[in-house]
Amino acid sequence: MNHRSGRVRLLKLAGAGARDRTERRHHCRAQGAVPDRPVRCDARHALVAGAGPVLRHRRGAGRLDLVERRRDALRGRVRPVGKVWRHHAESSHPDQQRPLIFLEVARLIGGLIFGVGPALRRLLRVAKLRPVECRAVLQERLLQILERKSHWAWPWFAEGRVPLPRLRPHFQQEWAVYVRDFPQLLARVMGHSDTPQDARAMLAANIYEEQTGGISGSTSHPELFLRMMEGCGFSRSDFDEVELLPATKLYRMFLDEISGREPWVVGAAVLTIFVEGSVNERRELQKTSPDSDAEIEVAIRQHPLVRIHGVDPKFLELQRVHKKVEGGHRLDAWKMVLGHMTSALENRVVQMVEKALEHWLAYRDDVARACGIAR
């Protein structure tokens, strides 16, 4: 008997609840709220109408209505318009303000994100890329910078338009800005406390070859450069105290600063990607095997110093060594920079490599003027 009376009581409550919900829907529409689908009109809309809260006077009813109101607000099931929104925002009840404020902030953020144009949308698409795809995007950005590492005066050097004695300022500035001290610049990058062990190993191998020639079985690269200068008819004393040109000095100051500044990967990118790289970097990366000795000798004999100025090929050992070992160094450089790059540093690395290009072009302008080349 008790169980039956309990079921009857529940059925009556359910019927009353259905009638109450119907009344609330009509009241909701009458007050200007436009629901996407039939919804419940709760205490918030009653307050708009100037009536008291429509809450059940039973145990736990207030808490239940509060939970349901928050759920409806978060789902966006009710879209207040006109005065309704203002009344909700101005309501002194914190439980009525919080969900609406949340929706307003969410809509504001959405408008900022999707209203700033195609550039941000492209950035968001890049942010969703997998790590391998992100590395490919960064590599392409750096390669596009290297493809601009070409100076208007290069044909004068490559085609022999300038007599060899007038090229002395070109070789002096090249020696002083990075050839002489390149192992030292690499050592600064390696010496950072945050440089990873595998990156230190790659940098150490590069330093070992640059300073000793131990990998190629020759001697240090600065020494090979001075031997090439002797083959060109210059003396070693011409390179003892070189006065840097204004743009050359700025370029060298930039290299000193970037190699000693943290994070290490920025300096590594500038030195190993840009300084050691060339306009032909993309083509060099596409090689599947190193050049043979015969191919290297053919390239040496086509060098402007040999083909045009008549320098003995034996003095171009530096070019031979570069062709033998630089392929491995190039792959190590890209692996090191791309493998340790973070999304937070990508734009900074690109910016610094771009800045290195600007310094390099200005430095080459000064060299061209010093060699008597007019644009």
Image (tube, rainbow, N blue to C red):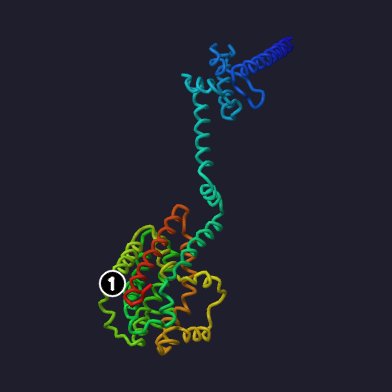
Residue 49 rendering spot, x and y as whole percentages: 55, 14
| Residue of label 1 | 244
Local crowd size for mark 1, using a 10 Å CA cut-off: few (<14), some (14–19), many (≥20): many
Residue 337 lies, with reference to residue 101, above or below; the image says: below
240 vs 113, left or right, is left
Amino acid type at image mark 1: Leu
From the viewer's side, name the closer residue of 39 and 363. Answer: 363
From the viewer's side, name the closer residue of 207 and 42. Answer: 42
State the quadrant of the C terminus: bottom left
State the quadrant of the N terminus: top right
Residue 26 rendering spot, x and y as whole percentages: 65, 16
Q: Residue at x 28, y 82 (%)?
A: 238
From the viewer's side, name the closer residue of 109 and 335. Answer: 109
User: What is the residue that sits farthest to the front in this orientation?
Assistant: 375
Q: Residue at x 44, y 83 (%)?
A: 304
Residue 295 rendering spot, x and y as whole percentages: 53, 84
